[in-house]
Amino acid sequence: MKIPFSWLKEYVNVGGMKPEEVADRLTISGLEVFLIGRVGSDSIFDIEITPNRPDCLSVLGISREAAASLKKRLSPPKAKPIKVTLKDRPSIEIKE
């Protein structure tokens, strides 16, 4: 799974830590970062996710793990509720 370091920093305040330091901490915690690539000025973590860790199959899941291993606070995104109104309700008929 590929995770941009810039996205990870949006969820976890890593301070002045370098991508290599964060990758080492993630690897120690059980998420093997086997490659750190570059795209432009951003570092991209290539992380091996084992089958027993489906909680880490998203940026938020990796961020939770990073926050725990770095002893930092997780700042998940704030979602605004969307008001949905139906102007034309569909008619439903149940036939036996």
Image (spheres, rainbow, N blue to C red):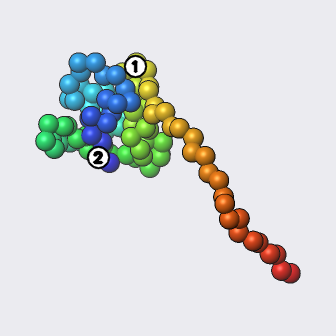
Q: Nearer the viewer, residue 34 or 6?
A: 6
Give the spatial CA distance, label 2 vs label 1. 22 Å
Please state the horizontal and vertical placement of residue 70, each as a whole percent of the image: 36, 21
- Using the image, determine if residue 95 lies above or below residue 12: below
- Residue at the far right in the pictured view: 96
Residue 66 seen: no
Residue tagged 1: 72
Q: Residue at x 14, y 36 (%)?
A: 41
Dot 1 amino acid type: Lys
Q: Is residue 82 left or right of residue 52?
A: right
Whether residue 58 is visible, yes or no, is yes
The residue nearer to you, when weighing 94 against 76, is: 94
Mark 2, other Cα within 10 Å: few <14 / some 14–19 / many ≥20: some
Q: Which mark identifies residue 2? A: 2
Task: Give above or below for 71 relative to 33.
Answer: above
* Left or right for 92, reference 77: right
Residue 55 pos. (x, y %): 48, 42
Q: Residue at x 27, y 40 (%)?
A: 4
Query: x and y percent of residue 36 in the render?
Result: 19, 39
Q: Residue 64: image x %, image y %?
A: 44, 31
Give the residue furthest to the bottom. Answer: 96
**SS for dot 1:** loop
Disc 1 crowd, CA 10 A, few/some/many (<14, 14-19, 20+): some
Q: Is 23 placed left or right of 50 in the picture?
A: left
Question: Which sits earlier in the primary sequence, circle 2 or circle 1?
Answer: 2
In terms of image quadrants, where is residue 46? Answer: top left
In the rendered image, which quarter is residue 33 located in?
A: top left
- The residue that appears at 44% across and 49% down in the rendered structure is 51
Q: Residue at x 40, y 18 (%)?
A: 71
**SS class of the residue under badge 2?**
strand
Callout 2, which amino acid? Lys
